[in-house]
Amino acid sequence: MSVSLDTAVSSLLTNRRRAGALKSLGIVSVRDALTYYPFRVTDPVPSRPIRESKIGMPIAFAASVQAVRAVPMNARRGFRLEAVVADDAGTAARLVFFSYKKPYVDWMSMRLRQGSRVVVAGSPSEFNGQLQFTHPEILTIAPGGATPLPDTAGSLKFDADSEEQALRRVCRPRPVYHATSRISSDHIHESIMGFLEALDAHELPDVLPESVREADGYLHRVEAFRAVHDPDTTDDFRRGIATLRYEEAFVSQTALVKTRHSTHQVKAHNCSGGEGLVRRFVASLPFELTGGQRSVVDDVTHDMARDWPMQRLLQGEVGSGKTVVAVVAMLDAVGAGHQAVLVAPTQVLAEQHAETIAGMVGRIPGGDTEAEAGTPEVPVILLTGGMKLKARRAALATVASGVPCIVVATHAAFSKTFQAPDLALVVIDEQHRFGVEQRETLRHRYDVAPHLLVMTATPIPRTAAMTWFGDLDLSWLTELPGGRKPIRTIVVPEADGGTMARMFAHLRARVDAGERAYVVCARIDADDATDDDDSAVELIDDGDIGENGEAETRPPLHSVAEIADRLAALPQFRGLKLATLTGRDDDETKTRVMAEFADGTTPILVATTVIEVGVDVPQASCIVIFDADRFGLSQLHQLRGRVGRGGTNSWAFLISRAEPDSIAARRLNVIQGTLDGAEIAQADLELRGAGDVLGDAQSGGKSSLKLLRVIKDAKLIEQARGEAERVLADDPELAHEPQLAGAVLDFTRGSADFLTST
Ligand code: ADP
Ligand code: MG
């Protein structure tokens, strides 16, 4: 059987238990095994005579066993196995092993039978004035001719055929793998080495084009895998890792650049006719566009005046005014006689957007020129799953008629029955997980591809954006419009009763001044074991494992039900009406609760993170977040962006039960110290790891990016980008690089999984 990367490891292993243990690590195919990278490599151990050994310094030597005995330890119900060995210079050392397991002791005594040759590796200590190795590594050496000893025929296998071989093995730097109770690092290593040997080298062709590999001095792929799993030197290991890391950077960038180029072959609606309407709209706004908004508007209208689809990601701080930009883009399409849709992540948001947008476009006056004078108002059509059937049908029918209009839809309503014959633009709001494959699907769903504008307030560091959204053009909105005042963020230890009381009094004062307050909890009620299903709380779990690796029990998270009851009983809130909102409320209730909060009927809203995204109540000036130490940083930032939107002073109170100096406490310090989303995202990445920032999917090992670190490897990613552009310029379809073409396809498919999962 020829072994390739796709061969199942279970077909290569006779040991079922081993196969099962590997599977639990996510290793199913040979590819999975080879890309199960060690996280470090041990320093090589020098081979020395025993007399040159120093306490605590690892050495290796060949020796003969002079005596061995197992001593029962009464006090501890186990055994101590002692052996005396002497090297060729005649220096003796003691080897000691402790175990509760008789079979282990028997097995080890057999390996260390008197007169046999072994290679020993370990760090000595001194015990009773004698040199002692505790639990050293032992390699047994076959006596000349490798014939097993007569009385143990068949049952005893030797670890090595010769001393030289054994020494070479223990003295080499050794890779260390993340292991579990089911399988040790050594056994993982042994398995991977077996696969690597069985693998037909032809089945491991290079993915990096030769020109790229040679220019940068990287290894061939086969050599790189060998260098990583079986390095001769630590330098070797580093080169192997560097090669494979660069391969990841190069493949991902090639995939993204290629997708981006292929977009240019696709036909889209040219919206250059929409300028007039856009101009009148901008003039009708009650405020000036900020510099940032103006420049993004220019980019967008420029993109949409071309014959291929715009693919743009707009990142902007919460409250930076992305909606206006979206409306400009949509009016550009409508003004050119086409249709546009804004896709919102939730029903509440869709309704809010529809209302805001209808208000904005309702103020557009007729134009001066004859053609513009009679411009009919721009229809704004809401489309959600929660609408009454009749209303929904009517909305769908209007859209299906092809009339130029703005549609505001929820995700579900957009993907199911949606038919827009003249769709020129899709705007995706607050949905940075709209992945490569979804973007491609969207493009292929229409004969003429719609332009695409993806908007997100989740700040993504530049290189991360390049890695994950390299097929999109990027725009940023950095300033907050309208002289908005920065939010004041205060961390409050929950145990500090005095501060808690003052905080509640502050909330009351703000409410009495006509403002509103949000109170956020992670759970709905005591039975709500999981997170709020509607809003994906990205809770952190680093605190779960204590110093000794034991799970620590942590206090349960506060819930909306519990906190609402507690607040209602507080003297500070006497006479006030509180409302609650969670993902479990139906859409009608959500809409009503938000309306009553906005108009002040219930000025305090206790909610789950359903309010996280986009909710815009300008009077809201305070937000209290319980269990803030258990939330992700970007999510806290997003939540705090719900207040101060009307230009009032604003406060975010982060209630914490974190120990001082813990990682959780440090995280809260970050958020308290800055309002800069990009900085927060960066800190979040550093404190948590990349997978968590985009969701959990990546940490499941599904992603094809295993070595590439989006922050640390920024330079590498940029370099790979350049080389990818060069390679694709010569060979746009990668016709001469079939291996690269295959890897690119795998990446696109794999990344679709992790970018779209929520
Ligand atoms: P986000 O980027 O979070 O979606 P929004 O688009 O909801 O932000 O805008 C937040 C608020 O700022 C809205 O009330 C909007 O009307 C207002 N706004 C947007 N642009 C400007 C501007 N240039 N000047 C003043 N206010 C603005
Ligand atoms: Mg918004």
Image (cartoon, grey):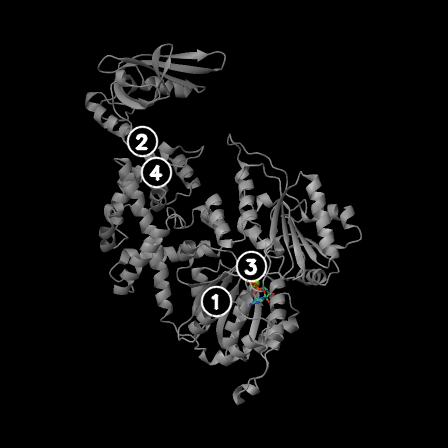
> What residue is disc 2 on?
43
> What residue is disc 3 on?
318
Q: Mark 3: few, some, or many residues within 10 Å (few <14, many ≥20)?
A: many
Mark carried by residue 453: 1
Question: Is residue 466 rendered to the left or right of residue 292?
Answer: left
Q: Is residue 102 above or below residue 29?
A: above
Q: Quadrant of residue 604?
A: bottom right
Gap in Å between the C-alphas at discs 2 and 1? 51 Å
Q: Position of residue 500 (x, y in %)?
A: 69, 43
What amino acid is at disc 4? Leu
Gap in Å between the C-alphas at discs 3 and 1? 17 Å
Q: Is residue 367 above or below residue 756?
A: below
Q: Is mark 3 within 8 Å of ligand 1?
A: yes
Q: Is residue 348 above or below residue 73?
A: below
What amino acid is at disc 2? Asp
Q: How many badges with numbers are in the image?
A: 4
Question: Is residue 388 rendered to the left or right of residue 84?
Answer: right
Q: Nearer the viewer, mark 4 or mark 1?
A: 1
Q: Residue furthest right?
A: 575
Gap in Å between the C-alphas at discs 4 and 1? 50 Å
Q: Residue furthest bottom?
A: 370
- Check disc 1 and report its element: helix, strand or loop: strand
- Point out the tag, 4 or 1, that comes first from the N-terminus: 4
Gap in Å between the C-alphas at discs 3 and 2? 49 Å
